[in-house]
Amino acid sequence: MFQRVTLIGHVGQEPQMRYTPDGTPVTTLSVATRETLSKTQSGGGERPCPQGWKESYNGRNWEITTWWRVTCWRGLGETVNQYVTKGMPIFVEGIVQGEARDGSVNPRVWTGNDGVPRASFELTARTVKFMTRAGEGAAGVPIGEAPPEGFEEDSLPF
């Protein structure tokens, strides 16, 4: 079971490249996506804050951030490791991987250092495009490679 997902977000940490026992490069990184909702209702008045959301920096919207753990294989992993940096806006297209053994698509849940429960989704990238901020050069070209057929991520030594 899988789902195809397209993300546009910002890289949350420097990518980390490792190698499988057979020498295949694999790079992981975190990507944050943000959804916003206007505080002003169409009929006037202020919309209440949805549970788990917070006020935006400008005070006009409610927002929520979702974190994605992205895994990039082979040449894609090497390219991402070389060129992607923390804070960079990127486009990622890939397949959601389930945390459960039955293949169901569930987020990975953990408790942060502050004691607050958190969750992230796992995505195996097929395509990554480097995006630009206003005033920067052209966006990068897509590069993509799938993991080996039948490879199980649980066999990675990290």
Image (cartoon, rainbow, N blue to C red):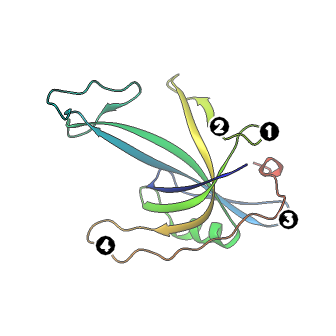
4 vs 2, front mark? 2
3 vs 1, front mark? 1
- Taking depth in this image into account, of 67 and 2 the one nearest to the observer is 2
In which quadrant of the rendered view does residue 23 lie?
bottom right
Residue named by callout 3: 22
2 vs 3, front mark? 2
Residue named by callout 4: 136
Q: Is residue 113 above or below residue 56?
A: above
Residue named by callout 1: 101
Label 1 and label 2: CA atoms lie apart by 11 Å
Question: Is tag 4's residue or tag 1's residue first in the polypeptide sequence?
Answer: 1
Mark 1: which amino acid?
Answer: Arg
* Element at label 3: loop
In which quadrant of the rendered view does residue 18 lie?
bottom right
Label 4 and label 1: CA atoms lie apart by 43 Å
Question: Is tag 4's residue or tag 2's residue first in the polypeptide sequence?
Answer: 2
Label 3 and label 1: CA atoms lie apart by 24 Å
On the rendered structure, is 103 left or right of 132? right
- Taking depth in this image into account, of 81 and 3 the one nearest to the observer is 3
* Element at label 2: loop
